[in-house]
Image (spheres, rainbow, N blue to C red):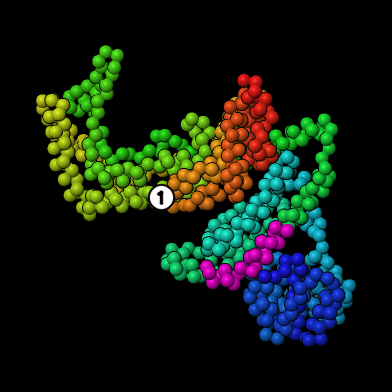
């Protein structure tokens, strides 16, 4: 693996003397790792073999492949987008220089080499980026996006944290050959960097993103077997791994640069402690919390529950009045409602299909309650929910088709016989004289058909309904009730990861799921909870007690949100209940 503390420089020059002179000039500088290629084709082979230099000194006229052709290939390869290219040539022809300029080299140095020009070019690449190179002006970003400085500061903090998480997570996804998942995670960071004007991180993320799109890696693989797809991805990774890893490390280094620039812009790490500064800091903390919650809720949907996610049962309900009886019988103060149900399938098959038909367990697992009837689901969890619903639907439809057989009409004729027998039995048991009319029999059969046909067509399992959620103005603190839904989300999100770290039976829920524990926890970690990445059972147990104390305390919902937010962010001392909660509980 290449030493990431060194600046990698590639010399592409066919003339041995010129190559020797340039190398000697570069060797007078510290911290360089120097590579040489005798022509453009050799350099291209080195680049394709895994070398990713920071800077390339490129001759113009060379055999096999000249400088123009090499630069054209470099500029067309997203994996090489970050390379700085400096043309070095004795050619002074204006037309040639215009041709070179069209390919956007970073500089053009005329031979013979001048030590000062070479050193200046290296220092330009190596030097600490100027603020404007790394960051667009915060005032310009706020004006462009129509946001407040506090919102900008929060989003920038979230982006830098995402970059640090991303550079750790991407190698894992690539080792698992989950290129689509890596591309999706990277694309979110790229878009956020673009929106916030974090220029160099955007450029690096864009280069990485383009590398995933090269060679058809993200193409539709449904026509290939899993083995063929895995083999192609493995071959691609073997060629590209060094490029990707180097760019990810460069991205992480740049995130530290942005963090330094941000700290300097704030006036250093030491904050003022005057009363006015304390109030300002309190307001900034509140603004940060509001921004965080608004951003999180924006990344999810309101999930309709109860009747909206129920599919029609395959058993046919029959009212008691069908048999000539009252559907409700009253004896004294008690009322008994009578109803019957005609079973279409055998008990074992019916139970198995019923398990496939229900999704309430999935809804509870992949969403957070906001109140007694409303739930919120992250956009990232919608994919898992729909994936699992599809799997259950396919399994249920398969079971149903096996039970009915290839001839649906023959099955319905058999059902008619069964329905008549069951109705006759119901009349006998109810001690009601008479029998079902032909019209009643046909109504029941039509009901059976209307329940079975959609299921056979692939519409067996219920599908949830999503809608946008408007929290209103959380900054309006006079109305504490506005913080009820945010508190429910914060509290339940925090409890999820602490329960996962302490409950030995937590993994049982994934036994029959298409996703595993790690995927689930990453998907549901909407607040970047550290316990979601690094479970600590002892800390989790202590913080469960803190969360319970917060919920029971008499403080306002806004204060409860502050306290839970502090626990999630690790700002509350482990094992010590927040002082606001302690005083509240003691005063009860």
**Residue 248: horizontal and vertical position, in percent?**
66, 61
* Residue at screen point 47% across, 42% down: 365
**Magenta stretch: helix, strand or loop mostly:** helix
**Residue 325: horizontal and vertical position, in percent?**
19, 23
Between 540 and 521, the one lying in front of the other is 540
- Residue 123 in view: yes
- Residue 148's image quarter? top right
Which portion, as a residue range, is magenta? 233-253
Look at the image and say whether residue 118 sits in the magenta stretch: no
**Residue 69: horizontal and vertical position, in percent?**
68, 77
* Residue at screen point 50% across, 40% down: 367
- Residue 471 in view: no
- In the rendered image, the quadrant that contains the C terminus is top right
Residue placed under numbered mark 1 in the picture:
512
Q: Residue furthest top?
A: 332
Judged left or right of residue 94, residue 588 is: left
Look at the image and say whether residue 245 sits in the magenta stretch: yes
Q: Residue furthest left?
A: 433
């Amino acid at each position: 693996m290449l030493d990431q503390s060194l600046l990698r420089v590639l010399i592409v020059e066919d003339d041995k003397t010129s190559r020797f002179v340039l190398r000697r000039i570069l060797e007078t500088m510290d911290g360089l790792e120097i590579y040489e290629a005798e022509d453009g084709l050799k350099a291209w082979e080195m680049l394709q073999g895994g070398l990713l230099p920071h800077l390339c000194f490129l001759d113009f006229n060379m055999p096999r492949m000249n400088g123009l052709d090499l630069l054209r290939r470099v500029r067309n390869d997203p994996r090489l987008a970050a390379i700085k290219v400096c043309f070095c040539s004795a050619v002074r022809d204006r037309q040639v220089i215009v041709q070179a300029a069209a390919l956007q080299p970073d500089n053009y140095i005329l031979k013979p080499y001048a030590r000062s020009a070479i050193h200046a070019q290296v220092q330009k690449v190596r030097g600490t980026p100027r603020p404007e190179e790394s960051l667009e002006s915060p005032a310009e970003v706020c004006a462009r996006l129509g946001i407040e400085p506090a919102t900008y500061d929060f989003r920038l903090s979230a982006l830098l944290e995402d970059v640090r998480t991303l550079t750790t997570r991407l190698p894992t996804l690539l080792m698992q050959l989950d290129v689509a998942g890596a591309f999706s995670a990277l694309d979110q960071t790229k878009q956020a960097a673009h929106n916030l004007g974090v220029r160099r991180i955007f450029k690096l993320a864009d280069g990485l993103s383009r590398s995933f799109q090269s060679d058809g890696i993200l193409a539709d693989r449904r026509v290939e077997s899993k083995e063929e797809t895995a083999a192609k991805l493995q071959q691609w990774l073997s060629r590209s791994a060094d490029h990707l890893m180097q760019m990810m490390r460069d991205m992480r280094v740049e995130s530290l640069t942005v963090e330094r620039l941000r700290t300097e812009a704030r006036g250093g790490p030491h904050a003022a402690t005057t009363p006015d500064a304390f109030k300002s800091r309190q307001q900034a903390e509140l603004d940060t919390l509001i921004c965080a919650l608004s951003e999180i809720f924006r990344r999810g949907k309101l999930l309709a529950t109860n009747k909206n996610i129920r599919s029609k049962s395959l058993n046919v309900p029959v009212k008691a009045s069908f048999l000539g009886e009252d559907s409700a019988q009253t004896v004294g103060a008690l009322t008994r409602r009578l109803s019957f149900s005609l079973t279409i399938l055998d008990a074992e098959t019916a139970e198995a299909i019923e398990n496939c038909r229900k999704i309430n367990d999935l809804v509870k697992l992949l969403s957070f309650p906001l109140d007694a009837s409303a739930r919120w689901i992250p956009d990232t969890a919608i994919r898992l929910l729909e994936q699992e619903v599809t799997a259950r639907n396919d399994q249920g439809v398969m079971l149903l088709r096996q039970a009915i057989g290839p001839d649906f009409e023959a099955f319905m004729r058999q059902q008619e016989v069964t329905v008549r027998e069951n109705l006759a039995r119901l009349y006998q048991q109810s001690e009601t004289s008479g029998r079902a009319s032909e019209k009643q029999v046909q109504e029941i059969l039509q009901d059976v058909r209307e329940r079975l046909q959609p299921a056979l067509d692939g519409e067996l399992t219920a599908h949830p309904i999503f809608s946008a959620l408007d929290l209103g103005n959380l900054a309006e603190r006079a109305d504490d009730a506005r913080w009820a839904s945010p508190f429910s989300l914060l509290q339940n999100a925090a409890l999820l990861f602490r329960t996962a770290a302490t409950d030995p039976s937590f993994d049982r829920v994934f036994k029959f799921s298409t996703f595993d524990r790690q995927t689930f926890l990453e998907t549901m970690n909407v607040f970047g909870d550290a316990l979601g990445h690094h479970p600590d059972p002892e800390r989790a147990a202590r913080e469960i007690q803190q969360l319970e104390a917060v919920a029971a305390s008499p403080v306002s919902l806004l204060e409860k949100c502050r306290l839970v937010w502090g626990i999630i962010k690790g700002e509350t001392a482990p094992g010590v209940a927040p002082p606001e909660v302690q005083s509240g509980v003691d005063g009860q």
